Image (spheres, rainbow, N blue to C red):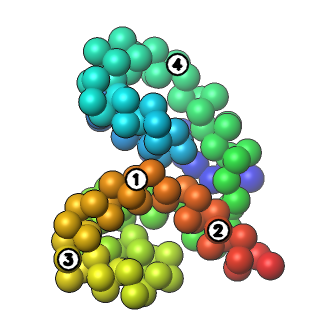
């Protein structure tokens, strides 16, 4: 089942020297390395242009599709994360309110969500499927 979008992957690749596409495809360690090394000094960033299709296939196999859309959640986190909108979308109302009142838990919660959002979505989709 298709959980991630190549189009969104390529759009995030534009900012890939900061690791955005790697976080999106569930690779938080390399995403963090890209963030601190400018995409491994832009070399890894250019190579990733050709690796996105395989990262997309891997993410589609690894994560559980369901009513919560990965693409919507990632767009909400990326652009409105400080307000907790992505957490409301996941049905996590309490932490959504907490993010709203604390600026995404002082931005630390947003960093946590960049590391774990794919897993959070899979868990919600798995629960809703059962």
- Contact, mark 3 vs mark 1 (Cβ under 8 Å): no
3, 39: nearer the viewer: 39
Which comes before the other along the chain, label 1 or label 4?
Answer: 4
Apparent side of residue 64 relative to residue 32 in the rendered image (left or right): right
49, 93: nearer the viewer: 93
Distance from the alpha carbon under mark 3 to that under mark 1: 17 Å
- Figure check: 76 above or below 100: above
Q: Position of residue 37 (x, y in %)?
A: 28, 23
| Residue named by callout 1 | 114
Which comes before the other along the chain, label 3 or label 2?
Answer: 3
Which comes before the other along the chain, label 2 or label 4?
Answer: 4
Distance from the alpha carbon under mark 3 to that under mark 4: 39 Å
Distance from the alpha carbon under mark 1 to that under mark 4: 23 Å
- At mark 1, the secondary structure is helix
Which comes before the other along the chain, label 1 or label 2?
Answer: 1
Which comes before the other along the chain, label 3 or label 1?
Answer: 3
**Which quadrant of the rendered structure holds the C terminus?**
bottom right
Distance from the alpha carbon under mark 2 to that under mark 4: 30 Å
89, 103: nearer the viewer: 103
Q: Residues within 10 Å of mark 2 (few under 14, many from 20)?
A: some
Q: Nearer the viewer, mark 3 or mark 4?
A: 3
| Residue named by callout 3 | 102
Residue sitting at x 63%, y 43% = 59
- At mark 4, the secondary structure is helix
Residue sitting at x 41%, y 17% = 44
Q: Position of residue 39 (x, y in %)?
A: 33, 23
Q: Residues within 10 Å of mark 3 (few under 14, many from 20)?
A: some
């Amino acid at each position: 089942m298709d959980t991630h979008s190549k189009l969104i992957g390529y759009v995030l690749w534009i900012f890939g020297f900061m690791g955005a596409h790697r976080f999106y495809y569930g690779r938080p360690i390399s995403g963090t390395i890209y963030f601190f090394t400018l995409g491994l000094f832009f070399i890894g960033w250019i190579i990733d242009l050709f690796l996105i299709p395989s990262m997309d296939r891997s993410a589609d196999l690894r994560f559980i599709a369901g009513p919560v859309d990965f693409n919507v959640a990632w767009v909400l986190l990326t652009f409105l994360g400080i307000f907790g909108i992505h957490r409301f979308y996941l049905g996590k109302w309490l932490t959504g309110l907490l993010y709203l009142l604390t600026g995404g838990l002082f931005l630390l919660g947003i960093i946590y969500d960049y590391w774990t959002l794919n897993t959070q979505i899979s868990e919600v989709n798995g629960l809703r499927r059962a």
